[in-house]
Amino acid sequence: MATTKEYAAEAPLGVFAIAVHLGLASFGIAAWLTGSLADDYKKAEHTGFTFHGWIGMGLAIFIILRVLLGIWGPRHLRFTQWIPCTKERLQRVREDIMGLLRLRLPERPLHEGLAGLVQTLGLLVFLLMALSGGFLFFTLVPGQKATGLVHAVKEVHETGQFLIPIFLSMHGGAVIVHALRGRHLWRRMLFLKESQGAPSPGDARVKQAESGVP
């Protein structure tokens, strides 16, 4: 588990990586909020469907950029940080979950343990929405009822109305809890320097510092 010094030494995300993260968040939330507008695809006038579709295309662009970062980007942003899913990495997730059950907040680098798992699931959800949404954007005929494969893909795409808020609640909740405990991760996503507040007495980092365990 990381110490306070190790958090301070974490590699910076970089302007491009932060921009990609903000793009994913902005277009992902916008796509979710405008999802219900797309129901007018059955009508001759389908402004909502068109609006939602172009937002979805914007989200797809940022997902592609994130995938490229995960393959060829800085080491700390590559998918190799949590893929393959090894026994050691799963053990870190288990430790974090057990810690939460004991009301102890996991303290690890951004892409390790439970945090890495949540981020992976979020990226998979957005990828699923982008692939299914892109298929519908080019195959769904406004003014006509969806049938066959198009209807099946439409049903899959509509699961985003439930999956996206679940992920946002988990991810956003973690950011809020970390901020309350003194680690303001949100500042890094707004191009601000992350401020490290004084850890509370029950913080895992304090216990490590006191025991001298790295």
Image: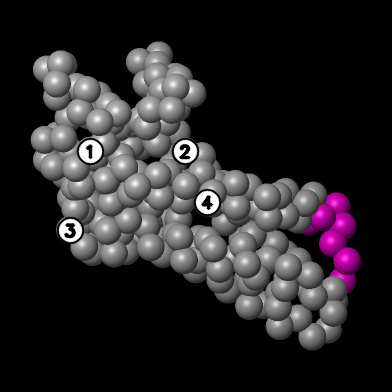
Q: Amino acid at mark 1?
A: Pro
Residue matched to label 1: 199
Q: Do residues under tags 3 and 1 come within 8 Å of each other at their CB atoms?
A: no
The residues colored magenta run 144-151
Label 1: element kind: loop
| Alpha carbon separation for disc pair 3 and 1 | 18 Å
Hey, which quadrant is residue 48 in on the image? bottom right
Question: From where the camera sits, is residue 80 visible?
Answer: no
Relative to the observer, which residue lies in front, 137 or 92? 92
Instruction: Decide whether residue 30 is among the magenta residues.
Output: no
Left/right of residue 126 with respect to residue 72 in the rendered view: right
**Residue shown at 11% from the left, 35% from the top:** 5
**Residue 192, percent from left and from top:** 21, 62
Residue 168: mark in rendering: 4
Q: Earlier in the sequence, mark 3 or mark 1?
A: 3
Position of the N terminus, as image quadrant, is: top left
